[in-house]
Amino acid sequence: MKLPGWVVGLLIPAALGVCWELAVRYGVAPGRLMPPPSRLAQTAWTLTLSGELWSHVAATMWRVAIGFLIGAAAGTLFGMLCGASAWAMRLLDPSIQAVRAVPSLAWVPLFILWLGIFETSKLALIALGVFFPVYLGLLTAIQSVDRKLIEVGRIFGLSRWGIALRITWPAVMPAWIAALRSGVGLGFMFVVAAELMGASEGLGYLLLDGQQMGRADSILVAMIVFALLGKVCDGFIVAVTRPVLRWQDTHRVQL
Amino acid sequence: MTTVTVRGLGKTYADGTEALRGVDVHADEGEIVALLGGSGCGKTTLLRLVAGLDVASTGTISLGGEVVSGTHPAVSAVFQEPRLLPWLSVGDNIGFGGRRLAKAERQARVDGLLARIGLPGAGGRWPRELSGGQQQRVAIARALIGHPGVLLLDEPFSALDTFTRGTLHDLVLSLWRELRPTIVMVTHDIEEAVVLADRIVVMKPHPGRVQEIMQVDLPRPRDRLAPQFDLMKRNVLRAINRSLAETARPRGGEGGVPAWI
């Protein structure tokens, strides 16, 4: 039997879905706390029609986008700084590593105290979560650039700046992009935490609301939408950066 | 246009290892000088100092009579590995060596060199798509596109099979006849030294020093099968044996001719 890979991958979820649907329909299982696929589709459809889902998605995406931009920019900046200068490395890295040792969610109470319950504290938390993988990924990549390629730059008369721009930067590009991708993943993780700590809209709010209202179906819809958004964002980064990674032997990126 | 003169050159690394002591070597304009010796005789260290990639502990390096330090626009190099930049196309890699050239001139030279190294039309390919020998040809083209006064070769043929090595020797010689750079090359291969060099500097180890300098007075193109060629090889081998005998005696043990000869 010859089936395309993605069909094979769908077999188990589809089978589970059908079984569950039948179990609930024939009264074998209750389905209130574990709603069957048809109910999920119905809920998703209702939320979409009322425009509610869209406003939650927009709120969440806005937070992730802003938080990601701040965290990724800061992570890139500090990564470059510590990668370029041994002095900056000695000065900054110990403090950054110390902050990293604190589980990021432990900042939540302090952020709320300092920045209030509204957007700023949420963005700060997301940015903090994105910062570390980007910083660490870029710094490690810069430190492991092949010395031999740097020497090629020196032989052909590149300045320190020229080497950074024409050798180091392209060399670390794949690792930087990989770091950004894990940054996006953490961004979504922290947006959930941020929205669970108090929000009036957003997919995290939908989760919390579903819990308080006993609506397992809207919780599951929110979870599925989270998964889809994460996938889309990751795919977006992969698609945008594909041209600059064309040279890589192993560029067959798995979405 | 460029002579290379090394005077009293020494290098001791930070960990106290003395890699090179009191080396005097001279290469005339357009001459090919081979630094020959086993591992630990400091030949690569010497080349790296001339390239300006490392800083000498003692002594001076002069190009065209002028004492220099650091890398120099007139000096180019090919390393043991091709060291192509994987994110640049083959053509852009060659062009990388000629960044100072005007764009049109650079492109013309890239195209010319691609044809010379037997890879016409391969300018748009990625380095990883080429074989090791082809990559090394590209590295040679990159080193020569700027018409350097001095070309340094750090065992660029050592990782290649015998057949590829022979064709690369021919390639280097034909480009050398055309552009006449002064070539200082490092090798541990006696035959390679005799095929390519006008002069052979036999080095000895611990610390790296010059054992003796031998003139190779064989007409070019050189015939590897000619009796004079064999004679020259044997003379070089004797010089190496002398250096081994001298370095082995005071330390005791490990004398004689090693297996690699």
Image (tube, helix red, strand yellow):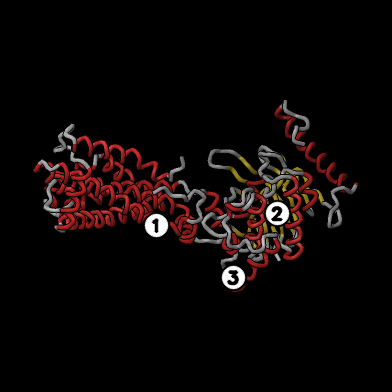
Other residues around mark 1 within 10 Å, as few (<14) / some (14–19) / many (≥20): few
Q: Residue at x 71, y 45 (%)?
A: B161
Mark nearer the viewer, 1 or 3? 1
Dot 3 corresponds to which residue? B101
Please, which chain is the residue tagged with disc 3 on? B
The reply to whether the C-beta atoms of the residues labelled 1 and 3 are less than 8 Å apart is no
**Residue B60, visible in the rendered structure:** no
Residue A118 locus on image (x, y percent)? 12, 53
Residue A146 locus on image (x, y percent)? 51, 48
Q: Earlier in the sequence, mark 2 or mark 3?
A: 3
Q: Amino acid at mark 3?
A: Leu
Dot 1 corresponds to which residue? A239
Q: Secondary structure at mark 2?
A: strand
Find the distance from the CA under tag 2 to the CA under tag 3: 24 Å
Please, which chain is the residue tagged with disc 2 on? B
Across the whole image, how many numbered discs are drawn on residues?
A: 3
Q: Nearer the viewer, residue B14 or B133?
A: B133
Q: Nearer the viewer, residue A139 or B6?
A: A139
